[in-house]
């Protein structure tokens, strides 16, 4: 009985999360390019880039940076939430670029959609770890994966705009 109730609650929460994601994606798709740029929240990229490079190119010691140091490097929960929100905007900007570069734009947007799952997983995983103790030891992995995914999304989008619409590239680079 308790297990059934718990599974029902988990199902409802997952369903509501998917519904919210779909609503946000639909809202962002209807915005103009300038409105999307205005929605980007500031994220310090130096710490994120350092973590992403450490994750993508591991050194002899694969231990890497400790969770507390990573948390400080990215700016904590507030910045992780910004990364998660910005991920949706970055995907919408990639979809917007499909007007000028239909083939490459579709490929980049799909890669970014997949990368955009990492900040969501990180927010959920770290929240669960903090509230009920589940996944506490995985916090470093969540932070590292979110930073790496955000770094790749940013890089993919900037490269797409540099190739497909160089006139908008400087504005995008300044916003990111």
Image (spheres, rainbow, N blue to C red):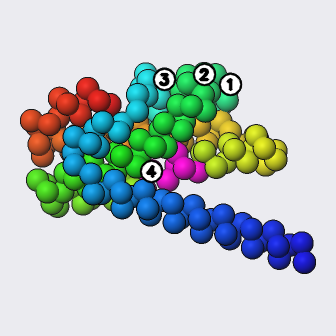
Q: Is residue 124 visible?
A: yes
As drawn, 156 above or below 173: below
Q: Are marks 3 and 2 in contact (CB under 8 Å)?
A: yes
As drawn, 46 above or below 39: above
Q: Check disc 1: other Cα within 10 Å, few if <14, some if 14-19, many if 20+.
A: few
Residue 173 location, x and y as percent?
25, 30
Looking at the image, is mark 3 or mark 4 earlier in the sequence? 3
**Where, by quadrant of the figure, is residue 155 drawn?**
top left
Question: In 3D space, how far apart are the residues under numbered discs 2 and 1 (Cα atoms)?
Answer: 6 Å
What residue is rendered at 60% in x and 28% in y?
A: 76
Badge number at residue 68 = 1
Question: Which residue position is annotated with label 3?
Answer: 47
Residue 156 location, x and y as percent?
29, 43
Tag 3 secondary structure: helix
Looking at the image, is mark 3 or mark 2 earlier in the sequence? 3
Looking at the image, is mark 4 or mark 1 earlier in the sequence? 1
Q: Are marks 2 and 4 in contact (CB under 8 Å)?
A: no
What residue is rendered at 65% in x and 36% in y?
A: 140
Q: Is residue 41 left or right of residue 100?
A: right
């Amino acid at each position: 009985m308790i297990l059934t109730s718990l599974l029902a609650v988990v199902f409802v929460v997952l369903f509501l999360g998917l519904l919210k994601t779909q609503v946000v994606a639909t809202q962002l798709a209807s915005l103009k390019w300038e409105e999307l740029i205005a929605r980007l929240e500031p994220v310090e990229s130096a710490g994120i880039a350092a973590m992403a490079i450490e994750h993508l190119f591991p050194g002899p010691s694969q231990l890497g940076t400790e969770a507390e140091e990573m948390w400080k490097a990215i700016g904590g929960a507030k910045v992780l939430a910004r990364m998660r929100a910005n991920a949706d905007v970055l995907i919408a900007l990639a979809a917007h670029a499909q007007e000028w570069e239909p083939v490459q734009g579709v490929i980049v947007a799909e890669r970014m959609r997949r990368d955009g799952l990492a900040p969501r997983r990180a927010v959920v995983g770290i929240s669960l770890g903090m509230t009920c103790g589940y996944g506490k030891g995985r916090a470093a992995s969540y932070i590292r994966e979110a930073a790496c995914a955000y770094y790749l999304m940013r890089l993919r989008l900037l490269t797409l705009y540099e190739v497909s619409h160089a006139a908008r590239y400087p504005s995008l680079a300044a916003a990111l």
